[in-house]
Image: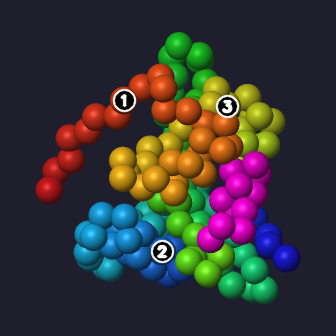
Amino acid sequence: MITIRKAILADSPSIADFQLKMAWETERMTLDPDVVIKGVKAVFEDPSRGQYYVAEATGRVIASLLITFEWSDWRNCNVWWFQSVYVVPEFRRQGIFRNMYAYIRNIAEEQDIAGLRLYVETKNERARKTYEALGMSSEHYSFYEWMRK
């Protein structure tokens, strides 16, 4: 049985490990583990930075995602951004993210959140198809960024 819940500080090592693996899988990028664990713990120290959610199976964290907040003056409420989505490989293609998405969407609807957004690495076709199957679209906006190296 899969349980979805808000993450707690004790989940930090798993979440940080997932981020290291995701960076390598999606972008062949090696991240500094010390920086990542500090970044994960910073979310728990200051909830205005976001909220992690995890999926658990038999006491093991098998997936995580981060929700961050964007204020929409057009809507006078928040939009939630999915970030750092990771599912352990042997649990992929089993509906784990679909269940996490439904869980988060339900909370968003209860809290009158304007919408849910995410970005995906452009070559990650599997993820793009997953998000489209959930009814999400990429037709309205293009994503641009400047990132300090």
Q: Circles 2 and 3: CB distance less than 8 Å?
A: no
Total number of numbered labels?
3
Q: Which mark is residue 113?
A: 3
Looking at the image, which residue is at 53% across and 66% down? Answer: 86
Circle 1 or circle 2, nearest the eye: 1
Residue 2 lies, with reference to residue 143, above or below; the image says below
Q: Secondary structure at mark 3?
A: loop
Neighbourhood count class around disc 3 (C-alpha, 10 Å): few under 14, some 14–19, many 20 upward: some
Residue annotated with mark 1: 142
| Residue 103 visible somewhere in the drawing | yes
Q: Which mark is residue 65?
A: none
Which residue is at the far top?
74
Looking at the image, which residue is at 80% across and 72% down? Answer: 2
Residue annotated with mark 2: 18
State the image coordinates of residue 46 (x, y, percent, origin top left): 49, 55
121 drawn magenta: no
The amino acid type of the residue labelled 3 equals: Ile
Residue 33 lies, with reference to residue 121, above or below; the image says below
